[in-house]
Amino acid sequence: MLIDEIVLWNGTPAMPDLACAGLDSAASSEHFRVGVDANYVTQGEKADHGFWIDGKRVDPLDLFAVNGANAFRVRLWVGEEGESRLEYAVNLAYRAQQAGLRPYLVMFLSEEWSDVNKQPAPARWADLTLDEQVRIVQQYTRETEQHFIDRGVLIDLYEIGNEIDYGICGVFADETQPRDPASLRSAIWPDQARLLQAAIEGVREADSEARFLLHIANSWSPEFASAFFQAMTDFGVEFDYVGLSYYPSSMGLPVAIRFCDTLNRLHTDIGKPIIIAETAYPAELPIGGMFGDWRRPFPGYAFTPEGQAWWLRDFLAGMRARGDVVGVYLFSPEFWFSGELWGPFALFDSKGEARPAIGSFNIEE
């Protein structure tokens, strides 16, 4: 089902160039990924939180796909059963694949959320030596990928860890430790690189054609981003894609504009294709919860359903125009039933009705 008529915001924009113009880069030959990270779909449906368009209940994955999405970011925590663990992730990845969304698998190497603020190791790995962790990580990723293969899931690409700026799997610089690139390169990144390469080698034992993405949150500092990916290269991590998080309303315009500088710096220094692994923009003013201060609008893009639709359409078009960016994934577009936590950023309103930004996926019209 297509959203045939989306009413886009028709004000006069005074926005920065979302294409990050000025890069002299030929268009990539790689198929551009327009993706969603919609891992709460299963939980929502079990709790009878439906997804609707014009009063008709729909399958959200089919709705994303028919409106132009072609990829799906799958979250995997260590463990067999429960939210985002193996069986949950395999079933959701297979469902996405059946809807025409190519799965990309994020192996968190944790039993819960890990991100730029925390990187806990699974409890049963926490007391192991680094050498022991390296061995078990390689075994885990090999067995996990084989399970996906056995269930008929074809993974498009693999992300090892999530927002791994300051470490992974218990090797982590917390807020009491230095987080400048020189300190991290000395104290954290060498051990982190061993774990990353072990995970990569494990996956390759099951899928010899596997391609890998490393993903950091720090899209606002060209210097940090370049230093991280250069360090991973220097320490022997065999990755194919650079991944970034980008939440413009969390940072404010002066900092968010540096995102373009980061893309250009990575293009020059690292030279690998770039994927925006997470992004989102609000359709209403965030008012509470842990993301309640992500309320800094881009000029020209109001916090309205129409403003959200324009921002997403323009951002997708801008990233595609660069040539070195080969994919953009929208974070939790289905999570309307979280209320004030993520509801403002979702592509469904507080009753589960589709917002017009779903029509913005189809940027080739």
Image: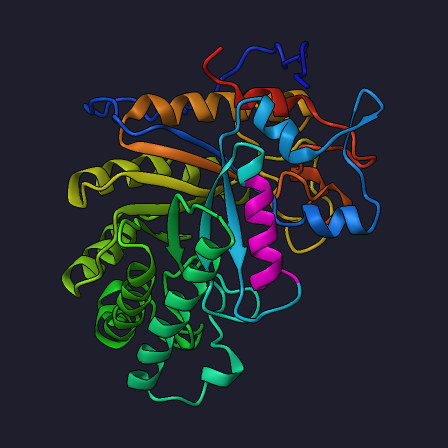
Position in image of residue 110 (x %, y %): 50, 70
170 displayed left or right of 182: right
Q: Is residue 85 above or below residue 129?
A: above
Horizontal side, residue 309 vs residue 343: left or right = left
Please report the bounds of the magenta region as a residue range: 83-96
Identify the residue at image location x=16%, y=44%.
Answer: 269
Residue lying at 64% horizontally and 50% vertically, measured from the top left? 291
Residue 287: x and y in percent read 73, 45
Residue 233 in the image: above or below residue 249: below
Q: Residue at x 52, y 50 (%)?
A: 74
Is 321 placed left or right of 332 in the picture?
left
Residue 94 inside the magenta-drawn segment: yes
Q: Quadrant of residue 80?
A: bottom right
Q: Is residue 170 visible?
A: yes
Closest to the observer: 15 or 361?
361
Q: Is residue 144 above or below residue 67?
A: below
Quadrant where the N terminus is found in the figure: top right
Residue 332 higher or lower than 353, as above or below: below
